[in-house]
Image: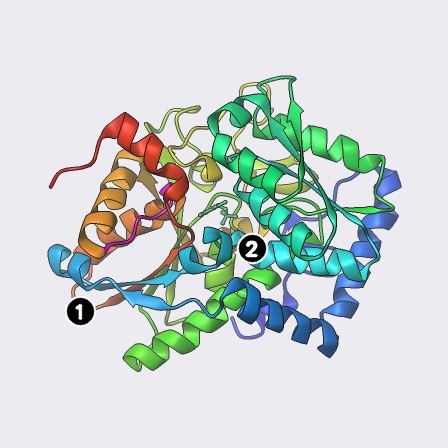
């Protein structure tokens, strides 16, 4: 797929039949404006240097690659390596696109950042970026999530963000998106809606992928440097799909590297028990873009479940849908149970407590490794598990010694 990243998406934001921008007419000029501002800035040396400076001196990039020798030995198959996005400031890959989105907003003369958040990870990363750039920040969050994710609510407030509780419907992520979008409609002249993954209307899937590309570009060089070869397999978990597109971008043009996206299989393959969108979904439209999605009997977004709240979304980034249709990326899954096992193993054997989202990628890498002696696997450790430790220990205990 030589030249892939430059040719996709097309001018209107389509990856094949997926993507686009299905938005209210009054927002069309505004999204065109974001797209034009981004295209111009992404060619500006001053902007790129500013971003480079922030990544190095504020975020702590480049993040390393670690060889999971103990885990690989225990499995006795392929060698597993991880890209350590858990060591990025705020503990996950999300700051990569939040800092870049905030910088774009600043260059566009905006004074405020708006977003929704589910578990609070995107909210915390965006609030961090807002503090850095001295911008206002408004985060919409369902009341159920506010209750569940208390430490992240405290973090956002300490960072100076306004947290808007959402009290209608299921009071979780989907309603938070509706609420944030409603608020944005009234202030899009002065604010930017900073979408938290490679989802939403064009140009967000393209911009967020390009902001996350740094993960894959670093990993390509680092892996070569460490092993003198490219990895045989690259693995990442897929919720909206941003950490996966970031890592995949570094390898997608090298056909010798197999790419694997890992979806959350939850507690069973019954609708409502998982969020394995590409595995079980059908074409549809959600939150202003076309993608594969999980629908209920009325064609509406279906309820979803995953042990990792960052993965439970009934849609998925349009680029993943396209890469699935071409076969360039294979999509598999990990259950809650396999994920917990990987969470405990990584903690106990390697001294790394992963986010439950990232543990899906590790679980899948472990399954692949068992079948692939002599090969190498690079998985994205998209974030650290601090946010999950109380939940895991209180609900499931400390794992077997
Ligand atoms: C939010 C989150 C994810 C899921 O988002 P993607 O856009 O699919 O990458 C994965 N891992 C961590 C640690 C997260 O915080």
Residue linked to disc 2:
95
Instruction: Give the CA distance from mark 1 to mark 2.
Output: 35 Å
Indicate left or right for 197 with 248 as reference: right
Q: Residue at x 79, y 55 (%)?
A: 34
| Residue 353: percent from left, percent from top | 30, 48
Q: Residue 181 versus residue 27: which sits nearer the camera? A: 181
Question: How many other residues sit within 10 Å of disc 2, few (<14), some (14-19) or many (≥20)?
Answer: many
Q: In the image, which is nearer the foreground, mark 1 or mark 2? A: 2
For this view, does 372 lie left or right of residue 2?
A: left
Judging depth in this view, the residue of 131 and 268 nearest the camera is 131
SS for dot 1: loop
Q: Residue furthest front?
A: 158
Q: Is residue 59 left or right of residue 393?
A: right
Residue beneath the point at 65% across and 48% down: 19
Q: Which mark is residue 65?
A: none
Image quarter of residue 84: bottom left
Q: Residue at x 47, y 67 (%)?
A: 216
Q: Which residue is mark 1?
A: 374
């Amino acid at each position: 797929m030589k030249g892939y990243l430059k040719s996709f998406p097309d001018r209107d934001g389509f990856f094949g039949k997926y993507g686009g921008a299905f938005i209210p007419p009054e927002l069309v000029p505004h999204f065109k404006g974001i797209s034009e501002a981004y295209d111009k800035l992404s060619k500006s040396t001053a902007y790129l240097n500013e971003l480079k400076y922030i990544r190095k001196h504020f975020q702590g990039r480049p993040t390393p690659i670690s060889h999971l020798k103990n885990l690989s030995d225990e499995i006795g198959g392929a060698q597993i390596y991880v890209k350590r996005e858990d060591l990025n400031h705020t503990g996950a890959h999300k700051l990569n696109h939040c800092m870049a989105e905030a910088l774009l907003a600043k260059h566009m003369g905006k004074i405020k950042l708006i977003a929704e958040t589910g578990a609070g990870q995107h909210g915390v990363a965006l609030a961090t970026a807002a503090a850095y750039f001295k911008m206002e920040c408004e985060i919409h969050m369902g009341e159920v999530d506010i209750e569940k994710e208390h430490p992240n609510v405290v973090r956002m407030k300490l960072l100076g963000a306004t947290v808007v509780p959402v009290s209608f419907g299921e009071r979780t992520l989907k309603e938070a998106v509706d609420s944030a979008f409603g608020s944005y409609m009234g202030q899009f002249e002065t604010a930017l809606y900073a979408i938290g993954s490679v989802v939403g209307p064009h140009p967000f899937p393209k911009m967020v992928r390009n902001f996350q590309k740094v993960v894959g570009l670093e990993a390509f060089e680092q892996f070569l440097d460490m092993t003198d070869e490219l990895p045989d397999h690259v693995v990442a978990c897929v919720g909206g799909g941003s950490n996966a597109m970031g890592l995949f971008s570094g390898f997608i043009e090298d056909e010798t590297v197999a790419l694997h996206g890992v979806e959350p299989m939850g507690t069973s393959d019954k609708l409502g028990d998982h969020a394995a969108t590409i595995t079980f979904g059908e074409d549809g439209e959600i939150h202003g873009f076309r993608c594969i999605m999980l629908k209920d009997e009325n064609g509406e977004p279906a309820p979803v479940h995953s042990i990792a709240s960052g993965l439970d979304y009934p849609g998925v980034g349009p680029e993943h849908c396209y890469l699935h249709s071409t076969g360039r990326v294979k999509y598999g899954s990990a259950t809650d149970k396999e994920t917990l096992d990987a969470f405990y193993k990584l903690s106990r054997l390697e001294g790394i407590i992963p986010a439950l989202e990232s543990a899906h990628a590790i679980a899948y890498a472990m399954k692949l490794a068992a079948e692939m002696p002599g090969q190498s696997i690079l998985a994205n450790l998209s974030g650290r598990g601090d946010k999950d430790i109380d939940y895991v220990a209180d609900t499931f205990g400390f794992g077997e010694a």
